[in-house]
């Protein structure tokens, strides 16, 4: 019930979207394996997706938001977005939607996805999906970078903490949607439009000149 708490108010998300979400969960053969199994069942063609959703799938509300955003955007885009849970983005990936929730940079998949996007100079569009999410300050960027470093190392990825902080700071310069989950359906078209127009690609190579401002 807590996982779907934000779906209780009728105006927030359409009943059709909720129905699709519930139907998918009930039909998934991977239900016994928990949400990770569900996501693996959904993402058999992940490597072919041009648009990827980065979200903390270990948090119930964030996971639900990712599923809803995926389905809403899927109706508006030629290419069905996929939810990322690997270490390296697929070769077909061209852009990412970062679903912002509390503690997001403690999630290995999100950290690796952001670093991978930066290394390949891909576009990342941040979308706030949780009440209480605080936009990064210089202090919190440093903390996020410090916590991300061991996560990246364990995944075999190399990015200096200062470079990661710089990349995250650049992502939030692209904030286009500052609403929370209650307007996901209404804003789906706005997200699709921003992705269609293009978002500035990340450039980790520019980090050294700006690292000091995050330390």
Image (spheres, rainbow, N blue to C red):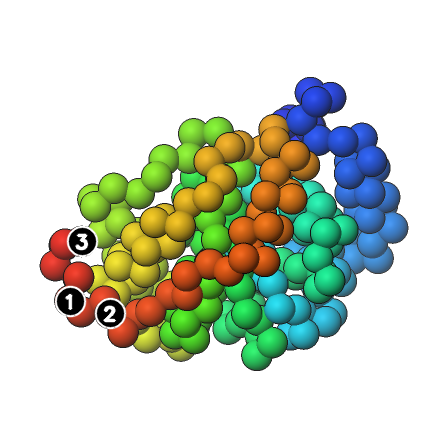
In the drawing, does residue 28 fall left or right of residue 193?
Answer: right
Query: Looking at the rendered structure, which numbered label has been put on residue 214?
Result: 3
| Between 199 and 206, the one nearer to me in the picture | 199
Label 2: few (<14), some or many (≥20) within 10 Å? few
| Contact check, label 2 and label 1, Cβ < 8 Å | yes
Q: Quadrant of the N terminus?
A: top right
On the image, the x and y values in percent for residue 202 come to 38, 65
Tell me the residue at 80%/30% (across/down).
15
Find the distance from the CA under tag 3 to the CA under tag 2. Answer: 14 Å
Q: Please, is residue 9 above or below residue 185 in the view? A: above
Q: Quadrant of the C terminus?
A: bottom left
Q: Which secondary structure, mark 2?
A: helix
On the image, the x and y values in percent for residue 100 come to 47, 44
Tell me the residue at 87%/50% (across/down).
27
Report the residue marked by disc 1: 209
| Between 91 and 145, the one nearer to me in the picture | 91
Q: Disc 3 or disc 1, which is closer to the eye? A: 1
In the drawing, does residue 116 fall left or right of residue 73?
Answer: left
In the drawing, does residue 199 fall left or right of residue 190?
Answer: left
| Between 168 and 176, the one nearer to me in the picture | 176
Q: Is residue 31 visible?
A: yes
Report the residue marked by disc 2: 206
On the image, the x and y values in percent for residue 75 come to 76, 51
Residue at the limit of the structure toward the front, as seen here = 197
In the drawing, does residue 175 fall left or right of residue 195?
Answer: left
Q: Which secondary structure, mark 3?
A: helix
Label 3: few (<14), some or many (≥20) within 10 Å? many
Q: Disc 3 or disc 2, which is closer to the eye? A: 2
**Number of numbered markers:** 3
Q: Which secondary structure, mark 1?
A: helix
């Amino acid at each position: 019930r807590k996982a779907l708490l934000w779906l209780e108010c009728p105006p927030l998300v359409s009943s059709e979207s909720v129905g699709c979400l519930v139907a998918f969960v009930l039909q998934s053969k991977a239900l016994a394996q928990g949400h990770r199994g569900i996501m693996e069942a959904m993402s058999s063609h992940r490597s072919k997706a041009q648009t990827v959703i980065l979200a903390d799938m270990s948090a119930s509300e964030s996971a639900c938001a990712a599923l809803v955003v995926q389905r809403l955007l899927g109706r508006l885009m030629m290419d069905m977005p996929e939810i990322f849970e690997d270490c390296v983005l697929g070769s077909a990936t061209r852009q990412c939607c970062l679903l912002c929730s509390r503690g997001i940079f403690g999630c290995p998949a999100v950290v690796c996805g952001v670093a991978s996007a930066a290394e390949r100079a891909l576009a990342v569009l941040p979308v706030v999906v949780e009440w209480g999410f605080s936009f990064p300050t210089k202090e919190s960027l440093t903390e996020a970078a410090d916590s991300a470093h061991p996560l990246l190392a364990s995944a075999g990825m190399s990015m200096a903490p200062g470079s990661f902080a710089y990349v995250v700071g650049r992502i939030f310069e692209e904030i286009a949607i500052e609403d929370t989950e209650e307007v996901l359906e209404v804003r789906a078209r706005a997200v699709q439009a921003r992705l269609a127009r293009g978002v500035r690609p990340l450039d980790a190579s520019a980090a050294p000149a700006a690292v000091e401002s995050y330390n």
